Image: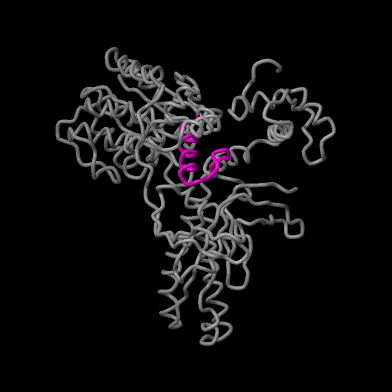
Amino acid sequence: MQQRKVITALFCDLVGSTELSGTLEPETLRSVVLRYFDAMRGGIESHGGTVEKFIGDAVMAVFGVPHVHEDDAHRAASAALEMIAALDGLNTELDRDFGSTLAVRIGLNSGEAVTSQDLENDGTVVSGEVVNVAARLEQAAQPGHILIGPATRTLLGPAAVVEAVGPLTLKGKRDPVDAFRLLRLTAQDGPPGAARPAADLVARTREYDRLATAWTRASRDGTGRLIRLTGDAGIGKTRLLREWLAARSAEGSLVGTGRCHSYRDEASLAPLAAAIREVLDTATAGTAPTAARSGAPQDPAPARPWDGAAYEVLRGGLLADGTPSPSAEATWAAAAAVLRGLTAVGPVALVLDELQWARPQLLEGIARLTDVLAGSPVLLICSQRPGEDERPTTADEIRLRPLSRADSLRLARALAGAGPDDGVLHTVVERAEGNPLHLEQLLTMVEDGADPGGLPVTVTAVLAARIDVLPQPQRTVLDAGAVIGRRFTVEEVRRLLDDPPADTALPEHTPVTGAVHELVRRGLVEPAPGAP
């Protein structure tokens, strides 16, 4: 079965391998090349990529097959940088053993491709212009360089440090391609309060007031609780938290922040460790946390309001490396004791962003802490997308909905400044459908001269990743609805699926209505007024 997917293709090729073959014996050369392939494969697979094939001395890999991730471009860029670093290590050995070294060049490109099953080799074949451009970028790269295409550059955003190499004329492409040399990736994942907002917060007064009220109650009444801030990707969860955290920072409150990641191989409790570490630093130093963010906290002052034995448990496990050492039970008990002790200094808030990427152990821990600290002035705030694992279930939910048309237009005008006229802004607002991030990205497309009627590649990547992991019954119903059009009824889907192709048939025990309700819960379709 063929499918269209948003992928990132990677091509890597040896430079000067012909000269190398003239200096080494065939058996030695084969050993060197095999070690090179192993090093390159390791970098690709450690970031979730799939090695598609080896072509001579070249390696072709794809990120987004078999499953699409919204951060496939970031994974591919991280893999490419790791491959360059791995080759440096291999070259040290090769120079010592054979007096020879290797050099590679790498090309990355992102976009839509067609994937199909390779029945003979039990794999997947990926084809399309996105793959061809990645190969051409690799051929245009200098030894030791990584060239990326414009879509990959956009998907990486501010996380990538690049050097523009100008429009390149690539074989098979009528128009020049804007290419960039990838230099490194930076950490663009600080706490929700770390980044400076691009514009004033728009139309979130009610949700902000609910956060403020919860904090006031925790401070005044000593009753802790868990707040789950939910909403689709780009709807403004992190932006709202930034605003709320800025107010708490101005007060000098004991607030700690952490963020979960989809692409990092981090310890299961690392986000919670970061949040508790920040609270400890603030409580002991009386200032905003600085150098202690990336390591174990500084030794607190002698007069500590929390249990010293509990602190030592955290210091040897959770705060050291983000793991539940010596055990999960001991970790949760120690964390509760330390947080309860910190409330002698003032009420405490722990903010964990992007909880949909959390490991199960972290979700279980949050539930435990919520129960144990219910009688203490500790507020836990977790942001996540709807339809994900929503443990713990006792949380108060604040759901962020799309902005109204009027509020979207107000935000568009604030972001655009003296840029596009009102006609263009109205088009952008209609296309963004109340999502502030989509609105911002569409405005960027307009500034770059693109048609605002299309979807930014960043939005396409997020949607493609969410659709790609749907169970087959939901995917079948969603595909059928898309065939019918933007608006469809359950009955129309039923009629379309009465005689579906064999590979898309719904299991008899899964009714269409059940699949539709699950798609609504996940936020991929929404009920429309009128017909069901």
Q: Residue furthest top?
A: 221
Foreground of the two, 306 or 58: 58
Q: Residue sitting at 27 percent across and 26 percent down?
A: 248
| Drawn side of residue 152 relative to residue 204, left or right | right
Q: Quadrant of residue 45?
A: bottom right
* Residue 195: percent from left, percent from top: 33, 38
The quarter of the picture where the C terminus appears is top right
| Drawn side of residue 256 relative to residue 356, left or right | left
Q: Which residues are magenta?
A: 435-456
| Drawn side of residue 214 relative to residue 179, left or right | left
Q: Is residue 447 magenta?
A: yes
Q: Quadrant of residue 247?
A: top left
| Above or below 138: residue 191 | above
Foreground of the two, 331 or 269: 269
Q: Is residue 321 magenta?
A: no
* Residue 109: percent from left, percent from top: 55, 56
* Residue 472: percent from left, percent from top: 70, 36
Foreground of the two, 84 or 328: 84
